[in-house]
Image (cartoon, coloured by chain):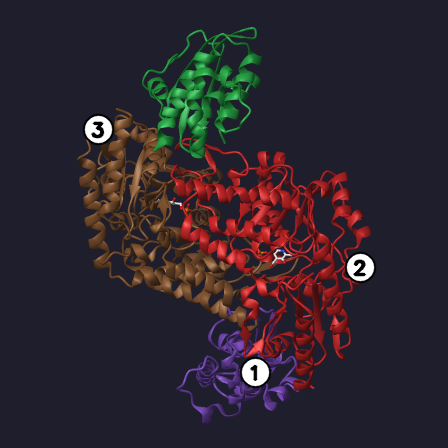
Chain colours: A red, B brown, C green, D purple
Amino acid sequence: MKSIKKDFPILSKKVNGKRLSYLDNAASTQKPKAVIDALSHYEMNLHANVHRGIHRLSQEATYEYEKVREKIKNYIHAEQVDEIIYTKGTTESINLLATSLAKLYIHKNDEIVISTAEHHANIVPWQQACQITGAKLVVCPIDQNGDIELDAFNSLLSPRTKIVSISHISNVLGSINPIETMIKNAKKYGAITIIDAAQSIAHLPIDVTQLGCDFLTFSAHKIHGPTGTGILYGKYAHLTAMPPFMTGGDMIKTVSFEKTTFNSPPYKFEAGTPNISGVIGLGYAIDYLSQFSWDEKLNYENSLTKYLIESLSTIHGLRIIGNPSKRSAIASFVLDAAHPHDIATILDEHGVAIRAGHHCAMPLMEHLKLPATARASLSLYNDKEDIDQLCNAIEDTKRIFQ
Amino acid sequence: MKSIKKDFPILSKKVNGKRLSYLDNAASTQKPKAVIDALSHYEMNLHANVHRGIHRLSQEATYEYEKVREKIKNYIHAEQVDEIIYTKGTTESINLLATSLAKLYIHKNDEIVISTAEHHANIVPWQQACQITGAKLVVCPIDQNGDIELDAFNSLLSPRTKIVSISHISNVLGSINPIETMIKNAKKYGAITIIDAAQSIAHLPIDVTQLGCDFLTFSAHKIHGPTGTGILYGKYAHLTAMPPFMTGGDMIKTVSFEKTTFNSPPYKFEAGTPNISGVIGLGYAIDYLSQFSWDEKLNYENSLTKYLIESLSTIHGLRIIGNPSKRSAIASFVLDAAHPHDIATILDEHGVAIRAGHHCAMPLMEHLKLPATARASLSLYNDKEDIDQLCNAIEDTKRIFQ
Amino acid sequence: MSNLIELYRDLILDHNKNPRNFGELQNATKSIEGVNPLCGDKLKLFLLLENDLIKDISFIGTGCAISVASASMMTENAKGLDVNQCLELYAMVHSMLIGKDEIDVERLGKIMALSGVKAYPSRVKCASLSWHALKQALSTNQLTASTE
Amino acid sequence: MSNLIELYRDLILDHNKNPRNFGELQNATKSIEGVNPLCGDKLKLFLLLENDLIKDISFIGTGCAISVASASMMTENAKGLDVNQCLELYAMVHSMLIGKDEIDVERLGKIMALSGVKAYPSRVKCASLSWHALKQALSTNQLTASTE
Ligand SMILES: Cc1ncc(COP(=O)(O)O)c(C=O)c1O
Ligand SMILES: Cc1ncc(COP(=O)(O)O)c(C=O)c1O
């Protein structure tokens, strides 16, 4: 694959007078110029509120905005456009699910299965749902490599299992979970399966129809789109049955002070003026990425990830956290000599942007018996030079903390 | 005030070969070039996820993002920056309040007071809260002019009144509600007062400290900022006591599978990656507007509104809906000859963008015994020529439907 | 303004001013409500069905010129048809409104007056509301139809 | 890299490697937890208070070099002070960390080694966590302090 770095204006920025090596992609990705320009173009030529407008601007905005559902439907291989709900991000999507499913479907002593390695966004909303309903949160363990313990997962399943909500890729360990198998097994007990694809949406092809999951969610800002926008995919039959999450304009059919009736999905779940420009930006981000085949993308990312792991492995006193059987473009590590925050500060001085901390996965940190890790995460626009710069900066950290 | 039209790129666009007269500002406002450029600049120079990052980009993004709280605090005269919560819009803000206050504070037989003229966003969430808690929705009537019936309002208040949630300005009638008095009277009974400032934020100076309201909310896209961003102001003591709305990353203090503790306000209410660019765009929109004094802005808008009303009044067969004692920059009207949708379509052909329909205020439409209205709503960038263009187009509508 | 002239043809304006088959049908065997949640248009259809045949049909409601004229023309055309013919006609009208090519101009006849709508995507729902309600009435037991 | 050299001075690195007063205080009259929710740093302070006087003080916990060195220096400096002196010192350190001008360099003495932090806004909380916990311990009955 040819280098696409020049498509992303921010990547040619100097940081502290240094070349920028942006390796914080698991936190948020950068936007190609095509997306940035499209957003400006939108604001300068067709912004208006959507859906209820008869005038040209509103029609054009509505058209551009609704068109993105089709793009997302195709990108994740959903069956119908009205299975694509716009949210403000993965976090809202999971809150929507936890709230709505708790009302409809989860009862006392039911069980909700997650894993040790979940992001807070896929833990706390379920804790809240458990508190409200009296259901139990069941945590599937991971093994020493950071892989889901599939046997343990299977033995946790039972007719009490109402929800299985699992991340596709761990944002700390980079482990790719065997969601095909997990979904299939969970389905045997009639459980509702939810995939948190926040970390996978930019990195793996996703086919919700083939997976057979009931819901899948991701955030636009993790796939080169704007912040404040996310997608919740849900099977239409569920969406029809579920009560709304937020209420207000646009999600209703009729309102009177006595009685309100709700619109059909996806609108039922989209109260208020949506993030019109955010959605349109996401559409352009998908277009940008779709110019490359998955073969190209996977080849490039896999070889770069391999280079990252190999390079880090040669650094004495550095320990990579987890050794998953399938790894995505993420590596967490610690140094004997320095705390992750100190690493991050020194790396930053070298122009290397990584993340340090608990990565919104405190229970996993507890499990790993680590207060924090340093995390480098790749995107398609990264190259070997970025990784070399990382490794040099880590050596400097060791020098300071020798 | 000098014309600022040229600051807004979209306004020099031709629509159907015609000059654009954008009079749909109550639905959504346009952005000045300063805001559009600032957003591009952000994406090209400092995008990163906020709060948890040690590297330069994340620090800069966090700084820019947090700085906006200060701007909003000053703009609405709040006492503390941590009383400013970022949401995705007015609709989310009111849902947050209805959900959180229902858990904390609203009980069976309590009363929630709204008015006949509320937007669905300030009706349906309260209906939901009533359904959950067994509280009663009490609707304060409006008089023939479209003004709140203050006597009726006062007599509705009682120790059972837990919430009074009122729009500052009706998005259909343009009536400016006497919220100072209403808040003062509601406070006598210890009610929590909530102001829906969606329509007033761009048009009236707001001083929450002087008003003494407990909460106030608005959307960025109604004040020349981006979609997908809103503000909820709340008194700090309330924010501390209230349970969170959504849960996940960033809003927690500690998470374990057994127990989660929440962060302090405003973070407690801001789960997940926020709309970073949206918030930053809002900050620039506030900066843009703040270059003009309120005197200038009010003078200009009031005289333009006067011209609008006078011009519409001369059109035979046109009826302006409501005659409020204080009117903001909104006028709803109907024609004897043509239905509002037909008006809107014909106006659009003349380059005039207005809105037609129920304006997300079906109960008000029911009260007015109208299926729909046509609505022209002004912003600072409008001028008399826009209004003349509107009136000419209305005359053409009459010709077609004679 | 040629689009406007196409949209508001005399026939449309006439049907709007003098809608045919307007009013409640006392001996209706079926009635159904149609709502357009975006704009608030509402209408109610009344059908007198004998076996498969629409012996009589009427409507009440409020709406824009397009929706009233369309409902009026719909009742005129549906009266006397059987269920299958109605569904066939519905499909043809739908194709015309969304601007598909392969439509049978002759079979549509005067209904073609509605074809100006296709230039106005936001108005297609106004024109299709009554047809949608007709289809719902004939094919399901639902009592409300919605364009959304 | 001059900022880095300012940040990671030898004194800081030394306090990090060999934190003073590290460990639980068996005869503590008060203890308090400090958390930095953004990064997960945690420490626990133990105080032996006699009337107004800090007779002894210690800490345990994990954190970056800045937070450990800062806690270590804090205990060294707080030991023997009375409550008011401590709060005064807290205020001075806080001013230094956020880069205010009017600070008493002499009174701060070796603590000035922490002044490199002011160039790193995201690290100020690391340096202030222990001081914040100290202030909380002396001024309230709360048992956790948080930098947020
Ligand atoms: C009075 C009023 N309240 C609430 C809203 C809802 O705002 P949003 O759609 O931005 O959430 C609007 C705008 O549509 C409004 O005019
Ligand atoms: C696995 C995972 N789940 C959920 C989230 C939350 O996404 P957001 O903050 O965009 O709502 C993230 C990203 O931070 C993540 O990595």
Picture quarter with ligand 2: bottom right
Marks 1 and 3: same chain?
Answer: no
* Image coordinates for residue A62, horizontal then vertical, percent: 46, 42
Marks 3 and 2: same chain?
Answer: no
Is residue B206 in view from this perspective?
Answer: yes
For mark 2, name the chain.
A
From the viewer's perspective, is residue A143 above or below residue B382?
below
Dot 3 alpha-carbon crowd within 10 angstroms: few under 14, some 14 to 19, many 20 or more: few
Is residue B121 in view from this perspective?
Answer: no
Q: Amino acid at mark 2?
A: Ser
Apparent side of residue A66 relative to residue C21 in the rendered image (left or right): right
User: How far, Cα to Cα, is label 1 from label 2?
Assistant: 41 Å
**Can you tell which of label 1 and label 2 is closer to the viewer?**
2
Q: Which residue is mark 3?
A: B317
From the viewer's perspective, is residue C21 above or below residue B340?
above
**Can you tell which of label 3 and label 2 is closer to the viewer?**
3
Secondary structure at badge 2 equals: loop
Q: Amino acid at mark 1?
A: Ser
The residue closer to the viewer here, A7 or C21, is A7
Secondary structure at badge 3 equals: loop
* Image coordinates for residue B157, horizontal then vertical, percent: 30, 42
Q: Which residue is mark 1?
A: D70
